[in-house]
Amino acid sequence: MTPYEVYDKALSLGKRIPKLEPFILKDAYWSYWYAKDVIKGRFISGEAVISKNARYSYWYALYVIKGRLPDFMHNALLLSNNEFAKEYVEFIR
């Protein structure tokens, strides 16, 4: 299955599908959307994947956690030194 197919199936069921989550974990984009739309909260195992993308890390802080990222994600985002890192710093102030 593709990450999108897992996301779409879980969204249509309105709940997590733990046995299919390894497919989601291959993609930062779908891990973010899975956390936001399906879990509606932190996706602990997905955070490692999300942390590799500054945009989705910032969105994860803004729309899922609604606050400061866990330390390892926070540090990775700040070290990325891109526009989303700057927006994140403004957001958490």
Image: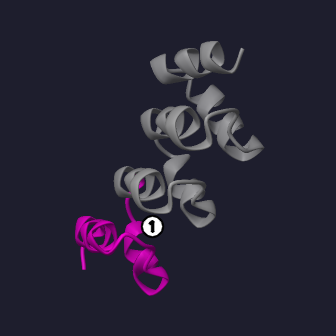
Q: Which residue was labeled with disc 1? A: 25
86 displayed left or right of 34: right
Magenta stretch, main secondary structure, is helix
* Quarter location, residue 88: top right
Q: Can you say whether 37 is above or below 4 in the image?
A: above
**Could you tell me how many numbered marks the image carries?**
1
What quarter of the picture does the N terminus occupy? bottom left
Q: Can you say whether 12 is above or below 17 in the image?
A: above
Kind of residue sitting beneath label 1: Leu
Residue 3 part of the magenta-drawn span: yes
Q: Please state the horizontal and vertical placement of residue 69, each as a whole percent of the image.
A: 68, 39
Q: Which residues are magenta?
A: 1-28
Front one among 67 and 76: 67
Q: Please state the horizontal and vertical placement of residue 54, each as a whole percent of the image.
A: 49, 34
How does the figure colour the protein chain or chains? one colour
Q: Residue furthest bottom?
A: 19
Q: Residue furthest right?
A: 71
At x 42% / y 73%, what residue is drawn? Answer: 15
11 displayed left or right of 82: left
Q: Please state the horizontal and vertical placement of residue 78, each as a whole percent of the image.
A: 64, 27
What quarter of the picture does the C terminus occupy? top right
Q: Please state the horizontal and vertical placement of residue 67, each as a whole percent of the image.
A: 67, 32
